[in-house]
Amino acid sequence: SQQGEEDPQALSIQEGENATMNCSYKTSINNLQWYRQNSGRGLVHLILIRSNEREKHSGRLRVTLDTSKKSSSLLITASRAADTASYFCATYMTTDSWGKLQFGAGTQVVVTP
Amino acid sequence: EAGVAQSPRYKIIEKRQSVAFWCNPISGHATLYWYQQILGQGPKLLIQFQNNGVVDDSQLPKDRFSAERLKGVDSTLKIQPAKLEDSAVYLCASSLDRGQGGSRFTEAFFGQGTRLTVV
């Protein structure tokens, strides 16, 4: 079973607009990460937010985390055609000696020029 | 630094045949993951190695799938016999775990994946 659920499943926007996608998860986490996957390629790490952080920025990306609601959001500002990809949230949970990284189903984003 | 290497990139086999995938993680990365990604879905963790030991294989169909990590470096994932529902992209990833405690984890680095088609 997958830990995260993304919403929406698909998003279509025009260049210059902002794209927002949400992730909900079920259990306590150590950190939450967002990855991007271009068609036919591997996943690329975008940003990591730890459980004691509430907001993080990286370039045009803004991530929020609400551990009380077990949810996170990813905002891409001023989107570009090159942002067209699938975006996945991934939760990282730790035991005493190792951790587990589990992915959600993803949001497919299409940015049209 | 070199990334995670996977081979082959594509493989087409008939059902009931066997297939093997190879992964070379980033040097020094203790953790190695194998994920299965079916078209339109997110990656599903099949097996996780910490150095050369298995720490999680709860979602690995052990009647047909097997994996090993030689000397804590390279890894192979095998399917025998393959079924039609095994058609997917198999992704290998690695991460650097620096020690005890949750703050050690940074990010996972993924290979390009192997696209398997079972006909």
Image: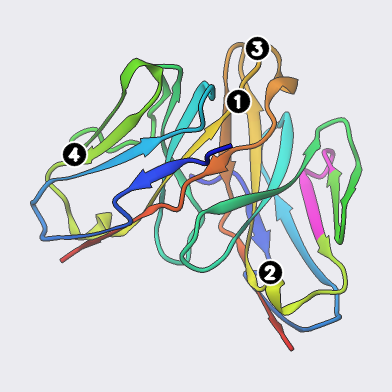
Badges 4 and 2, same chain: no
Residue A108 seen anywhere in this rendered image of the structure: no
> CA–CA distance between discs 3 and 4?
33 Å
| Chain for disc number 1 | B
Q: Is residue B64 magenta?
A: no
Q: Are marks 3 and 4 in contact (CB under 8 Å)?
A: no
Question: Which percent across, then down, holds residue A109?
Answer: 66, 73
In this rendered view, identify the residue nearer to me: B8 or A51.
B8
Residue mark closest to the camera, 1 vs 4: 1
Per the rendered image, the range of residues in magenta is A66-74
Callout 3: few (<14), some (14-19), or many (20+) C-alpha neighbours within 10 Å?
few
Q: Position of residue B14 (x, y in %)?
A: 10, 60
Q: Are marks 3 and 4 on the same chain?
A: yes
- Of the residues shown, which amino acid type is indicated by label 3? Gly
Categorize mark 4 by other alpha carbons within 10 Å: few (<14), some (14-19), many (20+).
few
- Identify the residue at image location x=71%, y=14%: B101
Q: Which mark is residue B99?
A: 3
Residues at marks 2 and 3 on the same chain: no
Instruction: Tell me the CA gap for discs 1 and 4.
Output: 29 Å
Q: Is residue A100 left or right of residue A47?
A: left
Q: Amino acid at mark 1?
A: Leu
Q: Please state which amino acid type lies under the numbered disc 2.
A: Pro
Q: Residue at x 54, y 25 (%)?
A: B29
Seen in the picture, residue B68 relative to A23 is either above or below; the reply is above
Q: Which residue is mark 1?
A: B96
Tell which subunit mark 2 falls on: A
Instruction: Report the label total.
Output: 4
Looking at the rendered structure, the secondary structure element under dot 1 is loop
Query: As shown in the figure, which amino acid type bears the numbered disc 4?
Result: Arg
Q: Is residue A16 above or below residue B37?
A: below
